[in-house]
Image (spheres, rainbow, N blue to C red):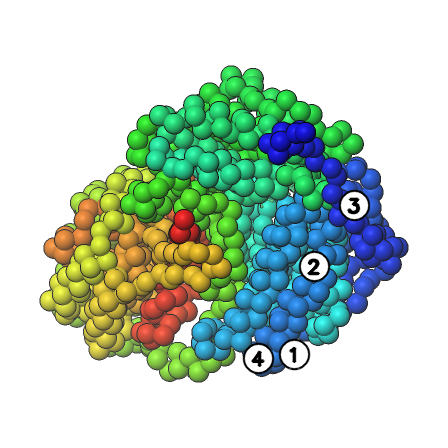
Amino acid sequence: MSTVAEIFKTMEYGPAPESDKEALAWLGKHERVFGHYIDGAWTEPGDTFDVVNPATAKVIARVTNGTTDDVDAAVDAAKRALPGWRALSAHARARYLYAIARGVQKHSRLLAVLESMDNGKSIRETRDIDVPLVARHFYHHAGWAQLLETEFAGYEGVGVVGQIIPWNFPLLMLAWKIAPALAAGNTVVLKPAEFTPLTAMAFAEIVDEIGLPPGVVNIVNGHGETGAAIVDHPDVDKIAFTGSTEVGRIIRKATAGSGKKLSLELGGKSPFIVYDDADLDSVVEGVVDAIWFNQGQVCCAGSRLLVQESIQDRLIAKLRARMERLRVGSPLDKAVDMGAIVAPVQLERIKGLVQQGVDEGATMWQPSWACPTDGYFYPPTLFTDVQPSSTIAQVEIFGPVLVAMSFRTPEESVALANNTPYGLAASVWTESINLALDIAPKIKAGVVWVNSTNLFDASAGFGGYRESGFGREGGKEGMWEYLVRSRGTGRAASRRVKQAPSRAAAGAKSAARGSSSESPAIDRTPKLFIGGKQARPDGAYTRRIQSPSGATVGESPEGNRKDIRNAVEAAHAAKGWSRATGHNRAQILYYIAENLAARADEFAARIDAMTEVGRRNAAAEVDASISRLFSYGAWADKYDGAVHNVPIRGVALAMNEPIGVVGIACGDTHPLLGMVSLVAPAIAMGNTTIVVPSEPHPLSATDFYSILETSDVPAGVINIVTGARDTLATVLAEHDDVDAVWYVGARDGARAVEFASASNMKRTWTFLDDRDWLDRDEGEGREFLRAATQVKNIWVPYGE
Ligand code: NAI
Ligand code: MG
C-alpha cells in the first residue's frame, strides 16, 4: 500500500490532448488554402506561402501573399465603406461589435485550437487567456461605440485605418486593433503576421456571419512588403502597428509628414523587481507567468529579474526547483506549461542570444529534462551573474530566457530598472504598499503591475514609453488613438470670420501709420534663454526682425545645434519640476499671467510692431494669453487620471504622467499666444521645455524672458532658442534626450521632425499653422493636456 504522498510523488502526467478535429475540419472546408478577405468576400488564392504548425514542423495551410494590387483593393473597399459605416447610428455600430463578441464566444473552441496549432502556444493559454480577452475586448468596445457621441463629443473617426500585427498573440492583437477602430467609426485594412494568419481567417468568417457591411473590415495576408504597401497607401489615414522596434522605426520614417496618425506598440525588456519583504512563493509563480507565459514571446515579458541582494540566493534556488518541474510539450496537451517557439528563425535568434550570454560570461541554467525534438521547442532558461550592460541584459530575446541581477537599495532598483532604451511594463513585488506606490511612478514604463504580472484588460490602457513606442490600446485612452477633432463643424467657418487681418491689409495699414514712435527703439540684442539665464548664442550671429511692411523691429539671436544641446541639458537638469505638486505649478502659471498683465501694453505694442495686426488685435492677443495661462493654472491640479474598472479584485490606476523634456516649435500666427498655448499645458503637466518661437516674429518670446525671471519659474523649465525654426526643430527631433517634439508649421517641417524622431521613437505632435488660437475650443483644453502627458496604468490587486 502506498500513501497518498507517495502516489503524488510517483504520479506521472498522462497526455491530455485537446481534440483538433474541429480545427482540421475547418481547414478542410477551406481546402487548406486562403486568399484575402476584401469587401466582404474571399479573393481567389494567388501566390501562396506555407503556414506551419511549430509543434510538428508540418505545413497545415497555405495563404496568399498580398500584392500592392490586393492592398489597393482592400483600401479602396474600406474607403467606399466609410461613409455608410459613419452614417450608421453609434448604437448600430455598438450592435455589430456586440455581435462580433458573441461570434467569438460561439466559436471559441475552434479559435483556441486553431491559434494553438498556428502559433505553438499552449491550449491552456489560448482557451483561458487569448480568446476570452478577445471577446472581452469586443464587448468593452461595443460600449465605447454606444457612448461615442457623448464621451467623445467634438471628435470623429480618423477614417481608413491600416493595422499590422505580430504573431505572438495573433487573434488578441487583431481584437486590440479592430475593436477600437470600429467603435470610433473607422474602417479597417488589417494584415496578420505571416507566421500566424489562420485565426484572422476564422475571424473574417465571423465578421461575414454576423453581416458586418462589406468593406468595414478587410484582411490582407502577406509579409513585410504587404505591410509596407498598407503603410505607404495615400488613402490610409492612420497606421496602428505592433511588432519589432526595428520595423516600428521604418514605419515612423515612412509616415513622416504624411499627416497619418500613428500608434506603435513595440518591444520591451521589462523589469520584474523583487524586494526583500516580498512573498517569495508568489514571486516564483509570478516569474513563471512573466517569462514563461507564451514561451516568453511577449512584448511585456518580465525578462529582467531584479532581486534584492539579501534574498537572491533563496529566490534563485526556489526558481530552479520550480523550473525543474515545468513541462514543455505538445501545445494541445492541456497539462503542458510551455508550447513551441513560433518559427525556426525565432528559435535560432533565441539560441544565438543565449550563446552570446554564455560567451559574455554569465551563468546559464536549464532544467535537467529535454524538450521534444519534433517541433521548435526551447527550455526555460535562467541566467545569473549577469552584467547590467551585457547583451542579454539589454536586448529583447523574445523567448523563455530570464536574466537575473541584484540590487541593494530601492534607489538602485529604480536605476537598474530604467537602464534600458525600452519602457513598456514592469512588475514590483513587495508587501509594502508604501514602497510599491513609491517605486511605480519612478519606473519609465507604460504599465506597472504590483505583486502581479501580465494582467490585461480591455478597460485599461496598454502601451509604452521611449523605444517601446507610443499610444495606448484599451481603455478610454486607447480610443483617442482612433479619433480626430471633427472636421466640418461650425468652427472652420467661424475661423474665417475671426482670422487676423491678412498680410496685405496689415501692410497697408502700417504704411499709413509709417514708422510711428510706437515701435520700440533698436536698443539691445536679446540673447537666448537657457537654464534660467540669458545666454549669448554659440554662433554669435543675430538676425534683423522686420515687420510685414519692412520696418525694422529689432534683432534676435541665431541659435544653433550647440545652443539646443545646452537647452536640452538645462531642461534635463530641471526635471525635478515633474515632482512639484499641481498646486505649486498652478501658482507659478498664475504668477506668469499676473506679470504679463502688468506689462500688457508693452507686449501688445511689440506684437503690433512685428505683425502689424493693429493695436486692438494685439491687445486681444495679450489678453487671450493671460486667460490661457489661467486656464492651465486651473488644469494643473485638475487633469486627473482614472481608476479603471478591471475584472480583478483590485484596481488599475491610470495616472497621467509628464512625458519629460518636450521640444516646442511654434507657429507664426499669434507670436505670443501661439507660444503660450503650447508652453503652458506642457509645463502645467510637469514637463520641461525647449521652445523655438516663431521665426519671423520671435521678439514676444525674447521679451518673455524677464517675465519668466520674475515669476519664480525654476531654471530650465522653459528654455528659449530663437532662430531658423525648422532647422532647430529637426535638431530637437534628432536629440536622444528629448522625449517629445511639438511642431506647428508646414508639411515639410512636420515631415522632417517626424522622420528624425525615429532615432529614439520620441512622441511627436505636428499640425499646420492654421489654428485659431483665439478660439478656446481650438486653442486650449484636453487635447493639449493629452499631448502633454502619457498614461501609466498601475495594477494593484488586493486581498489575501
Ligand atoms: P516584425 O516587426 O518584423 O513583424 C511584425 C509585423 O510587421 C508582421 O506582420 C510583419 O509582416 C510586419 N512587417 C514587417 N516589416 C514590415 C514593414 N517594413 N512595413 C510594414 N509591416 C512590416 O517582427 P518579427 O520579424 O516577426 O520578429 C522580430 C523580432 O521583433 C522578435 O524577435 C521580437 O524581438 C520582436 N517582436 C516584438 C513584438 C511585440 O509584440 N512587441 C511582436 C513580434 C516581434
Ligand atoms: Mg521581421
Q: Which mark is residue 108?
A: 2
From the image, tell me which residue sits under label 3: 51
First in residue order: circle 4 vs circle 3:
3
Spatial CA span between label 2 and label 1: 30 Å
Give the residue type at disc 2: Ser
Q: Quadrant of ligand 1?
A: top right
**Which of the two labelled residues, at mark 2 and mark 4, occupies the earlier sequence position?**
4
Query: Distance of mark 3 from mark 1, alpha carbons?
Result: 35 Å
Earlier in the chain: of badge 2 and badge 1, it is 1
The local secondary structure at tag 3 comes to strand
Q: Are marks 1 and 4 in contact (CB under 8 Å)?
A: no
Whether label 2 touches label 1, CB < 8 Å: no
Is the CB atom of the residue marked by disc 1 within 8 angstroms of ligand 1's nearest atom? Answer: no
Q: Which residue is mark 1?
A: 84
Q: Which residue is pictured at 69% across the width and 25% down the height?
A: 370
* On-image quarter of the N terminus: top right
Q: Is residue 1 left or right of residue 445?
A: right
Give residue 183's position: percent from left, percent from top.
Answer: 57, 70
Q: Secondary structure at mark 2?
A: helix
- Alpha carbon distance from label 2 to label 4: 25 Å
Residue 77 as seen in the image, left or right of residue 676: right
Q: Earlier in the sequence, mark 3 or mark 1?
A: 3
Q: Nearer the viewer, mark 2 or mark 3?
A: 2
Q: Amino acid at mark 3?
A: Val
Give the numbered dot on residue 91: 4
